[in-house]
Image (cartoon, rainbow, N blue to C red):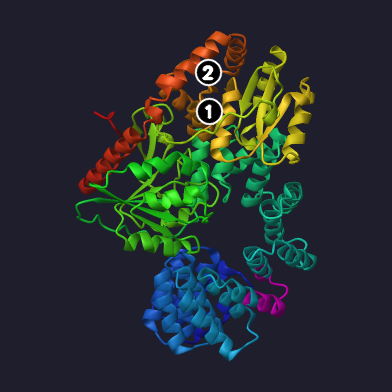
């Protein structure tokens, strides 16, 4: 036994020094002599945990507590590991064993963190308060209490707890970051900025705090250029900082800031190829990229998602229960497309439930959506695990995610597998990866069979276009040209896509078209007349030999008024590699022809799908040269433009693209096939035939 004691002493020395491989070798030597040595099992498990070898760590720590169940530290370390790998319920149960042996503050506060991860904020609050009853100066307990109060909507109490945590441990970056988030949440973004500025004085090299400040400046304080500078500093400190690199390149696109764009695009694609984590798949859609790159990016993005993956079983009931998950169930482009779908579902065969994770903007659209479902569940303040549990408890048969990897999405909900069948539709034009969904709904143009290998999901091909549209959308009276800033005469080219979809190559083509058509203008969209993108695009026009005054900017307005603008547009000029999606169907619904170029990715083929569905496939081009030539040709041919408008006003409006009922029935047939496949234990691509 003396030999084991000596090995243990030497192993401890190496372990404390961070020499994990040497320590593990010595622990293994002990276990070779004494396979049930609880001390060696425990500490080697910790060493494997520190190395990131979670499987071996789990084996060792479990063996340790099974050998000697009286060691609270071993139970606590097992709980920490289970939390790390996403087994939150097991982690809480493990911590309960540890606390029964030793209710030490550190064990309790870690148990509270596990309870939070398992979506038990009330239990986490009680546990954190138990620590504070022992030690009112325990900063981590105040921090954890703030985290527990936040999802309960007790924001002022949470802020008080976070403020106490920050005062007790001013050097903890996470505490200041949470305090700033809570200050933002109660509508005090300037206080949040002061909190972050103060924290950055202590830790100027903190990537987390600087990223938090950049996000605050971009989204809450309306200072995108200041935000950009901070994102750039984060990336300078950590070149592969995925969130900052994603926000930086996306914000540059939104600002039409194309300085060194090729270098930044190359850097982003290289990071994707290298397997860098936390790079936004959504940001990649607007960059030159392949379907394979987009799938790889989504795979890396979802790799860190952890959840309870066991699927519930299909229920046996008269009606299929369909759940729609989205943060966009308010005044939003997705809602304008899909409101009619929710209303048109056949209630004899389908029960339809909304799971809303976004804000209630108290708009007429929100009221309409609330009425459109059999039940509308507001989960805007619920953590993802609680959202998933609500869906699971409701016994949803088919869960349809309408967000994908777009802003405010909750892919972690999908990772919890709350429904037996999970479907990805409408909101994100690409694969989700990560085992999040079983099916992706597309059509013969956006997701042709030959592209199937670039999607993790089984492809469901709808007839006509995949995109549902609401054919009841009103269009306001047409304003005068003068009222919307257009000159009294001259041809109007329009593109009301968001600015991040515009890039130098697209703008080169547009400039060429404008130079070819005297007196024409290019009508774009802006949130404010003084936003930076307006000045940047005017500068880019000048650089291309186009009078910047020929760029006219329409400001955001209510949907019916916005649709009326298209009556003054002679031709909608699409973008690439990320096409117009909702804006393309907006233009077509309002009678404005859309000229597009078909790309190789889902995002770059949507407009081709839409114009084909309204019977105008001749508006789909295959190259930049063809796109420019076709635009110039149409500009010089008023008779052809009138023919296109006549097509859109008559057959186009009656086409499959705007047949809400037909698309709804096609989706319902798709849901039935998915259920039938599930019962047979298969998951295969299939095509939905047109409505009989």
208 is higher (above) or lower (below) than 687: below
Q: Position of residue 149 (x, y in %)?
A: 54, 74
Image-quadrant location for residue 657? top left
Q: Which residues are magenta?
A: 161-175
300 is higher (above) or lower (below) than 210: above
Which residue shows up at 76% across the image and 60% down it?
A: 205
Which residue shows up at 72% across the image and 72% down it?
A: 171
Q: Is residue 112 visible?
A: yes
Image-quadrant location for residue 532? top right
Q: Secondary structure at mark 2?
A: loop
Distance of mark 2 from mark 1, alpha carbons? 21 Å
The quadrant in which the C terminus is found is top left
Image-quadrant location for residue 514? top right
Q: Is residue 259 visible?
A: no
**Residue 138's disc number:** none
- Closer to the observer: label 2 or label 1? 1
Q: Position of residue 646 (x, y in %)?
A: 47, 16
Chief secondary structure of the magenta span?
helix
Q: Does 574 sit left or right of 53 as displayed?
A: right
- Magenta run includes residue 144: no
Compare marks 2 and 1 and give the one earlier in the sequence: 1
**Residue 622's disc number:** 2
Which residue was labeled with disc 1? 587
316 is higher (above) or lower (below) than 670: below
Neighbour tally class for label 2: few under 14, some 14-19, many 20 plus, Cα within 10 Å = few
């Amino acid at each position: 036994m003396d030999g084991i004691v000596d090995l243990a002493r030497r192993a401890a020395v190496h372990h404390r020094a961070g020499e994990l491989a040497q320590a593990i070798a010595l622990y293994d030597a002990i276990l070779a002599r004494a396979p049930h040595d609880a001390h060696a099992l425990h500490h080697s498990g910790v060493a494997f945990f520190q190395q990131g070898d979670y499987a071996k760590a789990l084996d060792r720590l479990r063996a340790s507590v099974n050998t000697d169940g009286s060691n609270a530290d071993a139970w606590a370390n097992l709980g920490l590991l289970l939390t790390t790998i996403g087994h939150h319920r097991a982690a809480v149960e493990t911590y309960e064993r540890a606390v029964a042996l030793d209710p030490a503050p550190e064990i309790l506060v870690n148990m509270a963190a596990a309870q939070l991860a398992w979506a038990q904020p009330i239990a986490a609050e009680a546990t954190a308060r138990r620590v504070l009853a022992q030690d009112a100066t325990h900063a981590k307990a105040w921090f954890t209490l703030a985290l527990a109060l936040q999802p309960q909507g007790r924001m002022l109490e949470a802020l008080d707890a976070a403020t106490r945590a920050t005062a007790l441990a001013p050097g903890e970056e996470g505490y200041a970051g949470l305090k700033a988030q809570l200050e933002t949440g109660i509508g005090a973004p300037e206080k949040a900025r002061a909190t972050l500025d103060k924290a950055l004085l202590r830790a100027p090299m903190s990537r987390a705090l600087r990223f938090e400040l950049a996000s605050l400046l971009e989204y809450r304080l309306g200072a995108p250029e200041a935000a950009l500078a901070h994102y750039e500093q984060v990336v300078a400190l950590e070149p592969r900082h995925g969130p900052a690199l994603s926000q930086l390149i996306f914000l540059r696109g939104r600002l039409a800031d194309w300085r060194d764009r090729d270098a930044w695009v190359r850097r982003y694609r290289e990071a994707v190829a290298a397997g860098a984590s936390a790079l936004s798949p959504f940001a990649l859609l607007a960059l030159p990229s392949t379907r394979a790159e987009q799938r790889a990016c989504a795979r890396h993005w979802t790799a860190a998602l952890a959840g309870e993956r066991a699927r519930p079983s299909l229920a046996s009931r008269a009606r299929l229960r369909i759940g729609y998950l989205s943060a966009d169930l308010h005044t939003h482009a997705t809602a304008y497309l899909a409101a009619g779908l929710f209303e048109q579902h056949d209630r004899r065969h389908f029960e339809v439930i909304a799971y809303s994770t976004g804000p209630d903007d108290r708009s007429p659209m929100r009221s309409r959506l609330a009425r459109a479902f059999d039940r509308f569940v507001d989960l805007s303040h619920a953590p993802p695990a609680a959202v998933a549990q609500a869906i699971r408890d409701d016994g949803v048969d088919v869960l349809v995610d309408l967000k994908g990897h777009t802003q405010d999405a909750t892919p972690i909900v999908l990772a919890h597998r709350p429904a037996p069948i999970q479907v990805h539709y409408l909101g994100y034009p690409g694969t989700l990866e990560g085992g999040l969904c079983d099916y992706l709904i597309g059509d013969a143009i956006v997701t042709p069979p030959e592209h199937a290998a670039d999607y993790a999901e089984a492809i469901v091909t709808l007839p006509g276009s995949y995109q549902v549209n609401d054919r009841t959308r009103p269009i306001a009276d047409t304003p005068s040209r003068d009222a919307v800033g257009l000159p009294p005469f001259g041809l109007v080219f329009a593109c009301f896509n968001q600015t991040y979809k515009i890039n130098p190559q697209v703008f080169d083509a547009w400039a060429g078209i404008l130079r070819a058509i005297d007196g024409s203008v290019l009508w774009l969209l802006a949130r404010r007349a003084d936003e930076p993108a307006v000045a940047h695009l005017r500068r880019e026009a000048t650089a291309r030999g186009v009078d910047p005054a020929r760029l006219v900017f329409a400001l955001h307005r209510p949907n019916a008024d916005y649709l009326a603008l298209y009556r003054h547009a002679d031709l909608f000029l699409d973008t690439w590699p990320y096409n117009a999606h909702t804006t393309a169907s907006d233009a077509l619904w309002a009678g404005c022809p859309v000229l597009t170029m078909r790309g190789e990715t889902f995002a770059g083929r949507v407009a081709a799908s839409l114009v084909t569905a309204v019977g105008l496939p001749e508006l789909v081009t295959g190259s930049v040269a063809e796109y420019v030539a076709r635009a110039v040709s149409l500009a010089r041919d008023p008779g052809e433009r009138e023919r296109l408008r006549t097509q859109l006003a008559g057959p186009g409006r009656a086409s499959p693209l705007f047949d809400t009922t037909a698309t709804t029935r096609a989706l319902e047939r798709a849901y039935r096939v998915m259920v039938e496949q599930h019962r047979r234990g298969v998951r295969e691509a299939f095509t939905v035939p047109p409505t009989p």
